[in-house]
Amino acid sequence: MNDKWWMLTLVGQDSPGIVAAVTSALAEAGITLGETSMLRLGGNFTVMMMVSGDTDEQALRSLLVPVLEARGLRLHIDPIEAELHQHLVPNVQVTVSGADRTGIVAQVTTALAEGGFNILDLESDLAGTPHEPVYIIQISGVSGEPIERIEERLAPVRESGVSVNVVPVEPYIG
Amino acid sequence: MAVLDILKLPDPRLKQVSGPVTAFDDALRRFIDDLEETRQDGPAAVGIAAPQVAVFQRVVIVDCSQTRKPVPNHGRLVLVNPEITHWEGYEPGREGCLSVPDYTGNVIRATRIHLEARDPQGAPLEFDMEGYEARAVQHEIDHLDGILFVDRVVSRRTDLFRRKVYQKGGKKSETTKNTKNTKG
């Protein structure tokens, strides 16, 4: 297998069947997938896909053009280094929720970054109602600090009226 | 004593249902010694089930006494013909598996269980378990039923949207809308 990898980013109006159309076009051209993540964000289709094959950036774009045009998708391609079969395992999970306001993610992640917290995964969502929006953040990552120290770092966030929950994560392996 | 080969996904034998142990003999106890040595080999696992080494008998080992943060546990347990007779509560937690290298995912498990089993001599055992240890036992008994944790993985988003549902028997408990399995 060719060692060259690209990250494809596709964004557009969501509709059923996009993943099937995109991955079929890739598979038919002999392009293999690595790790991928599809999310629907505010009604938009978004996917990031590691792809590899005996190809180049121009050829990758060309083979996806029919799908892009039919589905109204935008495509971005980056050459990447692929680190496969080396997943980092999270040891801390942080959940934050509170009345929506600008800057919650910035405040939380800055406090975590100051302790060297390596975020492996972050998802945030706007819940509640249009009149009473609630922001919910779920973060998992690797920290060399004890839970109590992370709690201390996040204390100012909590004092600002946001609910913060820090729990150790120890995957059960069996 | 010997370290046994671990079956890994996609080996179809991991889907096989294991049968009950009927002979509590020296051969069983020799196998249990090998299974324990295998559990502790390489990246040591908290638990292991016999079918992971291609022995399709209802034997599991768990040891939740060595976690980074101490959790309620009953020490190292060898459980023959284990059976969960009661379970309650639900919570997601991260799991991985010797048979599925380099992958961890969130699985919903009962938070409290009552367990009945036999020891390697055939004597009856009974435990009330909670949290991590209850999760361990549910994960391992799944192996005996040919189920891998990847069959039960839920998305992170699912965790956020809990709701009350009514379980069989009219008991109210908290679970997630995507959880079909109520048994460990």
Image: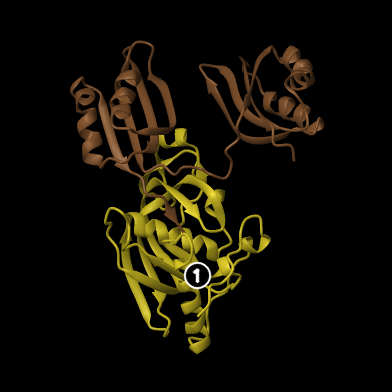
Relative to A158, is B31 above or below?
A: below
Relative to A86, is A65 above or below?
A: above
Q: Which chain is brown?
A: A
**Residue at the outermost left position:** A159
- Identified at 55% across, 53% down, the residue is B101
A78 or A95, nearer to the observer = A78
**Residue at the outermost bottom position:** B26
- Identified at 61% across, 63% down, the residue is B7
What is the number of callouts on the image?
1
Q: Is residue B75 visible?
A: yes
Q: Is residue B112 visible?
A: no
Asked where in the image residue A78 lies, by quadrant, the reply is top right
A84 left or right of A164 in image: right
Q: Name the spot of residue B55 as percent of width and height, x first.
A: 59, 73
B38 or B18, nearer to the observer = B38
Q: In this figure, which residue is indicated by the disc labeled 1?
A: B38
Q: Residues within 10 Å of mark 1 (few under 14, many from 20)?
A: many
Q: Which chain is yellow?
A: B
A8 or B137, nearer to the observer = A8
The chain holding disc 1 is B
Asked where in the image residue A20 lies, by quadrant, the reply is top right
Judged from the image, the secondary structure of the residue bearing numbered disc 1 is helix
**Colour convention:** by chain
Q: Name the spot of residue B53 as percent of width and height, x first.
A: 57, 69
Relative to A86, is A134 above or below?
A: above
**Amino acid type, label 1:** Thr
A164 or B171, nearer to the observer = A164
Q: Name the spot of residue A125 as percent of width and height, x first.
A: 42, 22
- Identified at 44% across, 70% down, the residue is B82
Q: Name the spot of residue B9 as percent of width and height, x first.
A: 62, 55
